Every structure is written in C-alpha cells, then in structure tokens.
Image: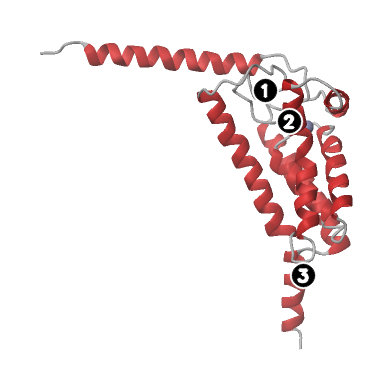
Amino acid sequence: MDTGFPKENATNQKSRALSDSLEAENALVQPDHGAGTMILSTHALVGAALANMFPAHPVAAFAVGFASHFALDAIPHADYPIRSASLDPKIGAPLQFDRALLQDAITIGADGLLGVALAFVFFASAQNQWAILLGVFGAVLPDAFQFLHARFPREPLRTLQRLHRWAHTDVEIKERVVLAIASQVLIVLAFGAVSFGVQGGRFFSAASAAAAAFTP
Ligand SMILES: [Zn+2]
C-alpha cells in the first residue's frame, strides 16, 4: 500500500531546496559596502611573481606581496560569492558551523591551495623558496586581516581595513564572467612575464637550459 510518506519527503526536500536557493539569492543581492576579495589564487600568483624578483630577500618579498594586494584590489574584478554570514567580512556574524560555512571553507581553501601550489610550480626554486612563500603569504594576508577585523574591530586592524576599503575598486564585473576570468588571467600573465623577464623562473630557466643542451 502506498503510505504517501515518500511523497511527503519529496515535498519537504523540494521546499528545503527552494529555501536554500532563496537564501543564496539573498546573499547575492546583499549590498556590497566592504572590500570584497579578489580571487586568492590571483593574489598568490602575483605575490609569487613579485617575490621571484627578490629571491634573497624574503622580508622585501613579503612587503611587496602585501602591497600588491591593495594594487590588485583596485583593478575591477569579480569574485565568488561568500555564502556564510560569519565568513563574510561585510556581515561578520558570529561563527556558525553550518553548511554555508563548510561550502565557503572548501571554496576558499581550494582557491588558496591552488594559488600556493601554482606559485611554487611556476616560481619556486631552491634559492628563492622563502621569498616565494613569504611573498604569497603577504599577498593574501590583507584578506585574512579583513576577516579578523570583522571579529575584532580595533587597531591596527581598523586602519588597515580603512586602507583596504579605500584601495578596493567599486566596479564589479560579476555579470561578465568571461571578461572577469580573462582579466585575472591577463593580470597573472603580465606580472609573470615581467618577473620571468627580470629574474627568470623555474620554467623559463628549464626551457633555456633545454635549449642550450640542444644547441650544438
Ligand atoms: Zn582584498
């Protein structure tokens, strides 16, 4: 006999899915009055490209990477939406370990790890690994400070947040996805090209070594 239970479950699920998607929509239409974040891997790769030019000076690499964050944020860009109100620096709600937080942790974690991995693949060598590490760290640090500021809104985080917000562009190109992605790729390629041109990179030196090996 059909009890009707499965049907009821399906309806429950459907309404839950609907409320979830409404929640997501609400998150998207929230007014943007903080400094949003450019994709972390872009920051990491640009930080590494710059650090590559200071192979023996990890502290300088850190400082330049840190400064690059604000310069990059000034360029119109798109970023992925932050779902959890507790991770969103514009809201700064108390930490709540829910599905949104988990989804965000996965997205942000994957983004950050990808950035660090690519930075090391393209730029790191035995001579510059500390510079690359600190350059990448400096380049993503302002976004971590922004998250901290939402929780602890005091000095020096307050001043830093003001600088972050001031530097950050008001232009969002969220709806033009191809342009948004292309512009980030171009930024990374441009910084990478300058960096390889000035200092050489792992791929660059491997390629020239190969070329030298094959030249009679
Ligand atoms: Zn930022």
Where 147 falls versus 111 (above or below)?
above
Q: Residue at 61% across / 17% down in the picture?
A: 27
Q: Which residue is mark 1?
A: 88
Indicate whether 102 appears above or below 191. above
- Disc on the earlier residue, 3 or 1: 1
Q: Image quadrant of residue 81?
A: top right
Q: Residues within 10 Å of mark 3 (few under 14, many from 20)?
A: few
Q: Which residue is mark 3?
A: 205
Going from N to C along the chain, the mark reached first, 2 or 1, is 2
- Colour logic: secondary structure
Q: Nearer the viewer, residue 160 or 178?
A: 160
Work out how far the residue at label 3 is from the one at label 1, CA to CA, in angstroms.
Answer: 41 Å
Residue at the spot of label 2: 37
Q: Residue at 20%, 10% (x, y): give it.
A: 4
Residue placed furthest toward the bottom: 216
Q: Quadrant of the N terminus?
A: top left
Name which residue type carries label 3. Ser
Can residue 186 be seen? no
Side of 99 relative to 32 (left or right)? left
Query: What residue sits 73% from the left and 43% below the top?
Result: 42
> CA gap, disc 2 to disc 3?
33 Å
Q: Is residue 195 visible?
A: yes
Q: Are marks 2 and 1 in contact (CB under 8 Å)?
A: no
- In this image, 15 relative to 7: left or right? right
Q: Nearer the viewer, mark 3 or mark 1?
A: 1
x then y, percent, for residue 126? 74, 66
Question: Identity of the amino acid at label 2?
Answer: Thr
Residue 142 higher or lower than 193, as above or below: above
Q: Amino acid at mark 1?
A: Asp
Extreme-left residue of the structure: 1
Q: Residues within 10 Å of mark 2 (few under 14, many from 20)?
A: many
Mark 2 Cβ inside 8 Å of ligand 1 = yes
